[in-house]
Amino acid sequence: MTSKAYILAVDDTPASLRLLTDILKAEGYEVRSAISGELALHAAAVQAPELILLDISMPHMNGFEVCQQLKKQPQTRDVPVIFVSAMSETLEKLKGFELGAVDYVTKPYQREELMARVRTHLELHRLRHSLEGIVEERTRSLVESEAKLRSTLLDTISAIAATVEMCDPYTAGHQRRVAQIAKAIAEELGLPPQQIEGIYLASVVHDVGKVKVPAEILSKPGKLTEYEFPLIKQHPQAGYDILKEVSFPWPIAQFVLQHHERMDGSGYPLGLKGDDILLEARIISVADVIEAMASHRPYRPGRGIEAALQEISDKRNVLFDCVVVDAALRLFREKNFTF
C-alpha cells in the first residue's frame, strides 16, 4: 500500500483479537480493535475504516447482524468486510457473501494467506475509489463542456437568425416568436427536454433559407406574381442546404426542410404526407402559421391571434396535425399563452 490503511478488527475473544491486531500492525497497518458488535458499529461510525475483519460468533450481536448494519449506513456500506470465523460450513459462507462480505477466512488461518487477502481487498477498494473519483471528475468536465457547447450553439443559431432578419426586416423577431410558440406547444405535448430544445433551436432558424430570396420579393407590399412565389417556396430547401453540414445534436436541417409540409401532401418542397412529416416540423409549421397570421406583413395587416387560431382549427387534420393543433388551442384559449 502507498500509505497506512486503517483496518477495524472485530472479535469477542481477547486472545484472538490481540493476535489479529498484532499481525496487522506488524504489516504496517493502522488498526482499531472492537471486542463486540456494538463497539464495532460505534468505531466504524466515528471513522469509517478501509477494511473490516469481522468474527461471526459473538454474543448480543453476531457478525452477520453487524455486517447488515454496516451495509445500511452510507458511510460504511462500501467498506469491504472479510469474515474471519471458525464457522466453516458452506451455508455460513454463502450467507456472509449474501450480506455483502467480499471474502471469508476460516480459523485457524495461515498468516500469509490472511495478509494476502487483506492486501488484495485493500488494493481493490482503493482502486475502485480512485476510479470513482476519475469518473466524477470526467463527469464534471463533460457537464462544463456541454454547457459551453450549448452556449456556443445558441450563439451560432442566433447569429444565423440575425442574418435572416437583416435581409427581411418585416419578419424581424418572427423566428424568435415562432420558437416561443413551438417550444410552448412541445411542452404542452409533454415532449422530453432534449427534444424541446431541438424544436426551439430549429424554430429560431426555420426561415434561414430566405437569405437566398431577393430582398425586394421578401419586402414586396403587394401580392406575389406567379414567377415570384416559386422563389419564396425555395427557402425550406435553401435552409436545408445551409444547415445540413452543421453538426447539431438534432436533425435541425430536416426540421427546417419540412416546416412547410402539410398533412394532406399539399405542402412543399417534398409534398410529404401525415407521419412522413417529422413531429418537430409539424409543431414548427403550426407555430409559424399562428405567428405569421397574427402579425403584420408588407402585403397585409396582422389579422390577430383569434383569426390565426381559427385558421389552424379549420384546417385541423387536413393541413395541420390534429394533436399539435389541439395543444396550441389549449395554450391560447385555456392557458392564456401570449408571445
Image: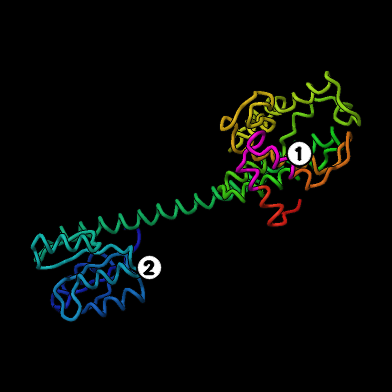
Q: Residues within 10 Å of mark 2 (few under 14, many from 20)?
A: few
| Displayed quadrant of residue 319 | top right
Indicate which disc residue 298 carries: none
Nearer to me, 29 or 273: 273
Q: Main secondary structure of the magenta part?
A: helix
- Number of labelled discs? 2
Q: Give the percent coordinates (x, y) of residue 114.
A: 17, 61
What residue appears at the point 54 percent right and 50 percent down from the top-left corner?
Answer: 141
The residue to which callout 2 is attached is 74
Q: Give the percent coordinates (x, y) of residue 147.
A: 61, 49
The verdict on residue 312 being magenta is yes
Q: Give the percent coordinates (x, y) of residue 208.
A: 75, 32
| Displayed quadrant of residue 149 | top right
**Cβ atoms at labels 2 and 1 below 8 Å apart:** no
The residue to which callout 1 is attached is 159
Q: Which residues are magenta?
A: 310-327
Given the image, on which type of amino acid does mark 2 rest? Pro
Q: Residue furthest right?
A: 221
Considering only order in the chain, which callout, 1 or 2, is on the residue closer to the N terminus? 2
Given the image, on which type of amino acid does mark 1 rest? Ala
| Displayed quadrant of residue 201 | top right
Nearer to me, 126 or 258: 258
Q: Is residue 255 left or right of residue 132?
A: right
